[in-house]
């Protein structure tokens, strides 16, 4: 067998493989770094307990000055390219922009600081609304706008949005809709999220215009979005589920949130929310311009009276009494103070009784034309004094002292002959 | 060497080189994408700086992962080791901590069933707030332990955007200003928690806690700032007294040092910084008047009788109005003072004429006409060529001077 051709082929293969290996090694190495880049070890989590003396990891993969750049877009891209998370990229670029603007800002600040008290003297601080129009105010505002623009240019307009401008996170919606089966809940959350995004886009489009006022077309577009959302909701939910959603999200649903001392049961809440909803619908009808003021007032009183009667029917007598107390502002003021001291609700109820008795007595004195003004004043002073004693006994000295500060203004009013 | 032996060696070399080639290829193939890299959008990095040159192909490693660490001390050490500037190390670490605690505080949102009443909502909200406060305190303690001082990146944002803050804290170096803001934020939040816990009904215990908090704030400020910086900061905070009490200095000659002293004195009347933390019990009218009188006596002692009279005049909107007019028309301050005095005298005399029961209606009208003419003459002399403009503007009170009682506009009399 002739072996030379085989040997030749083998040698040629060796040469090709050697060249290929060399080429592979060359193409995977970083391109001629300024300082030698040490081979990067595989990432291993650093133990959570910090060492007494922290030391930098061996073999750090780069030097900062090789990714930083005066061109912030390049700086940003370099950070992204080395796997820096987007949140950190934003913070770094924002910090660099702050640093870059810092010296210019400092120059403006220094230019007016030695005149600070002179400006106080001339009332500049008093007229705070003038601050943006002052020379330094204009300079700082203009610099701040330039800074914002640069942040927007490099990181996008989203980077300007602060926490307050963000929409509610889906986790909150999930909780709000926890009464729905999981699958529907997830779909409704997604629907809501999409709708909110569309609304945000609609608002952003308006905001980008010089006047920002919605035109009829804009309003039409918004209504279409809303209609589309509501249609999708209808498709997703059964009629009872939709009714439940509407009840929970209606304007009158949160009435219990502002009634201290009255915690409705779920059934009570449902009954009273329905009644409130009907009452509100009836109230809206009073906006009819054909009604005279007297007619409107009469109808309003009638509706109010009907509503109270309906609530009385819906609740048992004890609960209705509690409900009425909770709706009484005078009781609420007393209740807030007695609660602060951990006293039972009955103390606030006794205090309210004393207040109503005293105010009725004072009204009688003021209406009594048989008394001279001097006699009326003397009688009012006596009522005021007596009321202070009574409330002091019901509440105790320190609670009464606190009550006078938080809601007890009416006690001084008792002694006034001519009430405002 | 014999041919079979040479061939065998060459074939072994073939095998070794094939294996080596496969190993090299394997190492150069990108591994699983790290989460951090997955978060980054696809980019085409620049090559001008020489780093990195991936030409759009995935990086073989994710260098940031060798820097970032769940252990913040290590993270800081790594950033420093790669030459990251110290101010940037601070902002990167604080942003990361902010994000970490932000996620942590979102894990337990509060939701109320619509039938939950106010009482149970408040209890749940307070409980949730207590948790969040605890997290915020933990975060601040962590930042302080890492950096050695309080720092909020948010504070720096406020410092960059808010004009009144820039005005008030502008005398401080930037880092100190941002630290003062962080400190104030921290203490204000703690004070708000006390108020919310009390449902905004403060009893003596609450006030004692708020006072203690305020003492802590002042103590921390005194650690942060030197004596003169602290004094200036406190004076600038107290300067709000002038705004709250509508105190003006138009037409008063007063030096910066005197003004600062006046502001310092006002603290005894109402301590603005303290009352932000510890609301005073409502003062009786007598106590309020007594404090006001004590303050004015101090101002009089500071300025002397003549300048105190100027100070009192400056509090009159009528004087400020004519002074503004005179400044607009480049008239001397004396012209404004002359018009103001004429107006006051005329108003007093008109009052006397109106009240004089010995005068008939005709005599009263005549006396008022004479007064009006004399006053108009004095005002015209003081204002010269600007007199007609004055009559059309703030000088309309002159026209009303001779009108019968009850027809004058109250606001036209100084």
Image (tube, helix red, strand yellow):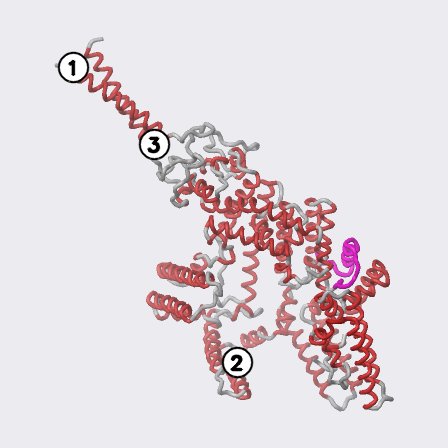
Q: Closest to the observer: B279 or B36?
A: B36
Q: Closest to the observer: A256 or B177?
A: B177
- Residue at (22% x, 15% y) in the render: B8
Image mark 3: chain: B
Q: Which residues are magenta?
A: B248-274
Give coordinates of residue A23: x percent, y percent: 32, 27
Disc assigned to residue A308: 2
Give coordinates of residue B74: x percent, y percent: 52, 36
Image mark 2: chain: A
Secondary structure under tag 2 reads helix
Q: Is residue B269 magenta?
A: yes
Contact check, label 3 and label 1, Cβ < 8 Å: no
Outermost residue to the front:
B385
**Which of pointers 2 and 3 indicates the residue nearer the eye?**
3
| Category of crowding for the residue at label 2, using alpha-carbon neighbours closer than 10 angstroms: few (below 14), some (14–19), many (at least 20) | some
Position above or below: A99 against A63: below
State the quadrant of the C terminus of chain B: bottom right
Could you give the CA–CA distance between mark 1 and mark 2, rounded to whole angstroms? Answer: 113 Å
């Amino acid at each position: 067998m002739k072996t030379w051709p085989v040997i030749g082929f083998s040698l040629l293969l060796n040469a090709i493989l050697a060249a290929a290996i060399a080429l592979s090694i060359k193409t995977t190495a970083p391109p001629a770094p300024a300082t030698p880049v040490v081979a990067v070890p595989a990432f291993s989590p650093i133990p959570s307990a910090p060492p007494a003396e922290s030391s930098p990891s061996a073999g750090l993969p780069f030097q900062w000055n090789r990714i930083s750049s005066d061109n912030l877009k390049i700086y940003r891209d370099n950070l992204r390219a080395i796997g820096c998370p987007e949140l950190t990229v934003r913070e770094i670029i924002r910090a660099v922009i702050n640093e870059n603007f810092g010296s210019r800002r400092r120059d403006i600040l220094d230019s007016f600081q030695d005149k600070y008290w002179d400006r106080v003297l001339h009332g500049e601080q008093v007229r705070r609304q003038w601050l943006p129009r002052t020379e330094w105010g204009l300079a700082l505002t203009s610099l701040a706008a330039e800074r914002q623009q640069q942040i927007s240019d490099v990181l996008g307009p989203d980077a300007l949005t602060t926490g307050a401008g963000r929409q509610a996170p889906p986790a909150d919606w999930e909780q709000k809709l926890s009464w729905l089966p999981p699958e529907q809940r997830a779909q409704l959350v997604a629907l809501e999220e999409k709708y909110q995004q569309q609304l945000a886009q609609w608002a952003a489009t308006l905001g980008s215009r010089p006047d920002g006022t919605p035109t009829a077309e804009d309003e039409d577009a918004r209504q279409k979005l809303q209609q589309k959302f509501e249609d999708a909701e209808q498709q997703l939910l059964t009629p009872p589920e939709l009714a439940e959603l509407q009840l929970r999200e209606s304007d009158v649903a949160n009435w219990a949130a502002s009634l201290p001392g009255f915690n409705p049961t779920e059934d009570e809440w449902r009954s009273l929310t329905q009644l409130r909803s009907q009452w509100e619908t009836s109230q809206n009808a009073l906006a009819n311009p054909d009604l005279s003021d007297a007619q409107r007032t009469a109808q309003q009183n009638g509706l109010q009276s009907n509503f109270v009667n309906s609530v009385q029917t819906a609740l048992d007598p004890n609960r209705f009494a509690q409900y009425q107390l909770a709706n009484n502002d005078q009781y609420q003021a007393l209740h807030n103070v007695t609660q602060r001291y951990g006293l039972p609700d009955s103390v606030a109820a006794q205090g309210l009784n004393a207040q109503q008795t005293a105010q009725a007595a004072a009204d009688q004195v003021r209406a009594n034309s048989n008394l001279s003004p001097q006699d009326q004043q003397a009688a009012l002073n006596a009522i005021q004094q007596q009321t202070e004693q009574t409330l002091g006994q019901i509440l105790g000295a320190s609670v009464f002292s606190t009550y006078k500060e938080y809601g007890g203004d009416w006690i001084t009013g008792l002694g006034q002959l001519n009430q405002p | 060497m014999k041919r079979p032996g040479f061939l065998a060696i060459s074939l072994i070399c073939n095998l070794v080189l094939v294996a080596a080639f496969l190993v090299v290829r394997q190492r150069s193939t990108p591994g699983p994408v790290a989460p951090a890299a997955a978060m980054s959008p696809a980019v085409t990095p620049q090559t001008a700086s020489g780093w990195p040159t991936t030409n759009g192909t995935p990086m073989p490693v994710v260098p940031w992962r060798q820097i970032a660490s769940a252990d913040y001390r290590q993270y800081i050490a790594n950033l420093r080791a790669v030459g990251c500037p110290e101010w940037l190390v601070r902002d990167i670490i604080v942003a990361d901590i902010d994000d970490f605690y932000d996620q942590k505080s979102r894990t337990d949102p509060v939701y109320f069933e619509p039938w939950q009443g106010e009482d149970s909502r408040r209890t749940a909200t307070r409980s949730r707030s207590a948790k969040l406060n605890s997290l915020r305190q933990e975060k601040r303690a962590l930042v302080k332990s890492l950096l050695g001082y309080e720092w909020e990146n948010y504070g720096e944002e406020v410092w960059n955007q808010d004009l009144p803050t820039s005005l008030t804290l502008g005398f401080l170096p930037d880092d100190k200003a941002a630290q003062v803001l962080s400190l104030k934020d921290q203490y204000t939040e703690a004070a708000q928690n006390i108020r919310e816990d009390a449902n905004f009904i403060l009893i003596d215990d609450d006030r004692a806690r708020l006072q203690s908090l305020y003492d802590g704030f002042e103590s921390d400020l005194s650690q942060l700032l030197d004596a003169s910086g602290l004094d200036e900061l406190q004076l600038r905070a107290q300067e709000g007294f002038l705004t709250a009490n509508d105190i003006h200095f138009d037409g008063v000659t007063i030096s910066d040092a005197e003004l600062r002293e006046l502001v310092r004195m006002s603290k005894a009347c109402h301590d603005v910084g303290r009352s932000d933390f510890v609301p005073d019990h409502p003062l009786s009218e007598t106590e309020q008047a007594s404090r006001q009188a004590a303050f004015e006596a101090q101002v009089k002692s500071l300025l002397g009788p003549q300048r105190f009279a100027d100070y009192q005049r400056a509090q009159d909107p009528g004087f400020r109005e004519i002074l503004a007019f005179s400044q607009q028309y480049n008239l001397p301050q004396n012209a404004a003072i002359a018009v103001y005095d004429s107006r006051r005298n005329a108003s007093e005399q008109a009052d006397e004429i109106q009240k004089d029961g010995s005068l008939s209606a005709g005599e009263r009208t005549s006396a008022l006409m004479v007064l009006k003419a004399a006053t108009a003459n004095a005002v015209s002399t003081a204002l010269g060529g600007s007199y007609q403009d004055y009559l059309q503007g703030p000088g309309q009170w002159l026209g009303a001077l001779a009108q019968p009682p009850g027809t004058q506009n109250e606001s036209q009399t100084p």
